[in-house]
Each structure stands twice: as structure tokens, then as C-alpha cells.
Amino acid sequence: MTTKAVLIGPPGSGKTTLGRLLAERLGVEFRDTDTDVEAAAGKPVADIFVEDGEVAFRTLEHQAVRRALAEHEGILSLGGGAVLDEETQALLDGHHVVYLQVGLADAVQRVGLAAARPLLVLNPRSQLKKLMEERRPVYERLAVVTVITDKREPAELADEIVKGLPA
């Protein structure tokens, strides 16, 4: 079993918005591993970080990615930091991984720095910039396709991704 596409990228890159749109266009299901983590933990991601810590969250996240890749045939969106786990990176091998690249200005506008993002609590703009810079090489290495999302409409991006999907 293999997914149609696995969307990766930083917060604000459009993984959820595009994932839902792609799934609708292709007539498949959309799945978000952050939602799976919240269901498994019985609480929001932000609460997992605060109450249980990042290590506990990353463990749940890895389990969610493993499960989703094994059983989901539609469009899959991974949390922005899921790709930092080496085992998760290995699991993505052979999948159609789409890196949604976004610039800092667009990411900040989309995320809205007041949102409940546990890794962006102190200096949100600076933290987001740091996360994006640290993760970019991993996103680029794992991606089969990179799509730049800045200043573009979701429908246009979805068209580009659909055209690039394997038959």
C-alpha cells in the first residue's frame, strides 16, 4: 500500500489546505498525522508539548507516521518536524514526497503568530525562521518534488502537484 502523495514542509506551507484540496480532486481520503497524534493522546498537540514534553510528542508522531504510511492510500500531511526523525525519514523512502516550500513572510502571514504552536512561543518570527532554516535541508533531501507556495493560490498549487503525481 502506498499513499498518493506525502506533503512535508514547515508550518504555514499549506500542507493541510493543499492536502484537503488534493484529496478532493483525486477522490481519495486526506489524513493529517497531527490529527492522528491528537486522537491517540486525547489532547491537542500544544497540550502534549506542555504536559508531556517534545520527546513524548515526537514518539507519538513517529508512530502516527508509521501507521499512516502502512494503511493510508490517499493524501498524507506530516507535521512540520516529523521528518527530523531518522526512522521516519527511512519510512518515506519510495513514497511520492512533496515539499511545500514557503518563505518566511508568507509562513508568518499564514500561521498567524498568535496560533497555538508550541515551538514558536517565545519569539515566534525568529523561532519560525530558525525552524525553517534547520529543516530545509531535510525537506529538500526527502522530496521527490518541491513546490514553491509563496504568493500562489491553493488551486494553482494543487494543479501543479496533480500533474506531477505518478500514474
Image (spheres, rainbow, N blue to C red):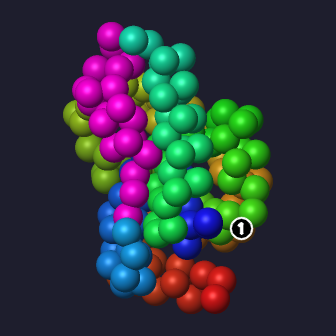
- Position of residue 37 in the picture relative to residue 103 (left or right): left
Q: Residue at x 59, y 44 (%)?
A: 66
- Find residue 18 and report its image quarter: bottom left
Q: Which residue is mark 1?
A: 144
Q: Secondary structure at mark 1?
A: loop
Residue at (65, 83) in percent of width and height: 166
What is the quadrant of residue 83 in the picture? top right
Q: Is residue 124 left or right of residue 131?
A: left
Q: Position of residue 77 (x, y in %)?
A: 46, 55
Answer whether residue 18 is magenta in the image: no
> With respect to residue 48, does 144 lie above or below?
below
Picture residue at 34% right of the left edge, 74% below the top: 21
Q: Where in the figure is residue 150, as x and y percent of width and height? A: 45, 66
Q: Main secondary structure of the magenta part?
A: helix
In the rendered image, the quadrant that contains the N terminus is bottom right
The answer to whether residue 163 is seen in the rendering is: yes
Q: Quadrant of residue 114?
A: top left
Tell me what residue is drawn at x 44 percent, y 13 percent. 53
**Kind of residue at badge 1:** Val
**Which quadrant of the rendered structure holds the C terminus?**
bottom right
- Residue 140 sits above or below residue 138 on the image: below
Q: Is residue 105 above or below residue 86?
A: below
**Range covered by the magenta-colored residues:** 30-51
Question: Which residue is nearer to you in this view: 139 or 67?
Answer: 67
Q: Is there any visible trace of residue 101 in the rendered image?
A: no
Q: Nearer the viewer, residue 100 or 46?
A: 46
Q: Is residue 164 left or right of residue 34?
A: right
Q: Is residue 36 magenta?
A: yes
Q: Residues within 10 Å of mark 1 (few under 14, many from 20)?
A: some
